Image: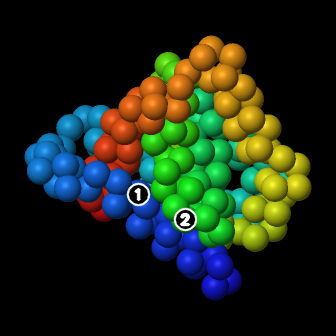
């Protein structure tokens, strides 16, 4: 349990630390997209609470996601898992993994992908589900496939990091709104 709390704390720190000064300088306006995103997040919370720590319930809920949403769920899950043992590595990988999602799926963090990403951050409260994800390599397979896509299409780490920076800003802005 201590590891889980430490991991969640690290993840919150990583997300809030990434370019938070720039996010504070940018005025945030309530818009239709923001309201829809807040509705999606609350709906997402209800969905993930309904899994009740059961791996079979998780798999049913996870399978409701489309390919892009699964990727962003796994991005948050991967960063969260890395932050337990290697917080510096996890922090460095955030931009890369989000940029990888942008180039592979031509879609970043928006009102359809953020709830999946948010769910990936919060799934760690269910130990049996986390073990199931790790045992069945659910996220590992998705992340390996995306990494191979970047390699096969000659994307550099620098390019992926650059594409991921704006996605991190979106997440930080949402975090600051809460």
Which secondary structure, mark 1?
helix
Determine whether 25 is above or below 142 in the image. Answer: below
Going by the image, does 138 lie left or right of 21?
Answer: right
Taking the spot 67% from the left edge, 29% from the top edge, the residue there is: 146
**Looking at the rendering, in which quadrant would you find the N terminus?**
bottom right
Disc 1/disc 2 C-alpha distance (Å) = 12 Å
Q: Position of residue 84 (x, y in %)?
A: 63, 69
**Marked residue nearer the N-terminal end (1 or 2):** 1
Taking the spot 79% from the left edge, 38% from the top edge, the residue there is: 141
Which secondary structure, mark 2?
helix
- Of 49 and 74, which appears nearest the observer? 74
- Of 32 and 88, which appears nearest the observer? 88
Residue designated by label 1: 15
Going by the image, does 112 lie left or right of 116?
Answer: left
Q: Position of residue 57 (x, y in %)?
A: 78, 55
- Of 104 and 124, which appears nearest the observer? 104
Count of numbered badges drawn on the protein: 2
């Amino acid at each position: 349990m201590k590891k889980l709390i430490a991991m969640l704390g690290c993840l919150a720190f990583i997300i809030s630390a990434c370019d938070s000064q720039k996010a504070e300088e940018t005025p945030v306006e309530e818009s239709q997209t923001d309201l829809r995103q807040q509705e999606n997040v609350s709906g997402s919370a209800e969905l993930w609470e309904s899994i009740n720590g059961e791996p079979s319930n998780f798999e049913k809920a996870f399978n409701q996601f489309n390919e892009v949403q699964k990727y962003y769920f796994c991005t948050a899950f991967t960063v969260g898992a890395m932050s337990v043992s290697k917080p510096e590595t996890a922090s460095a990988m955030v931009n890369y993994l989000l940029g990888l999602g942008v180039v592979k799926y031509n879609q970043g963090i928006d009102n359809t992908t953020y709830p999946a990403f948010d769910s990936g951050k919060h799934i760690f409260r269910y130990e049996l589900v986390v073990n199931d994800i790790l045992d069945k390599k659910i996220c590992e397979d998705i992340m390996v496939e995306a990494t191979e896509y970047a390699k096969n299409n000659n994307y550099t780490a620098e390019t992926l990091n650059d594409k991921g920076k704006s996605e991190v800003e979106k997440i930080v802005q949402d975090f600051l709104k809460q």
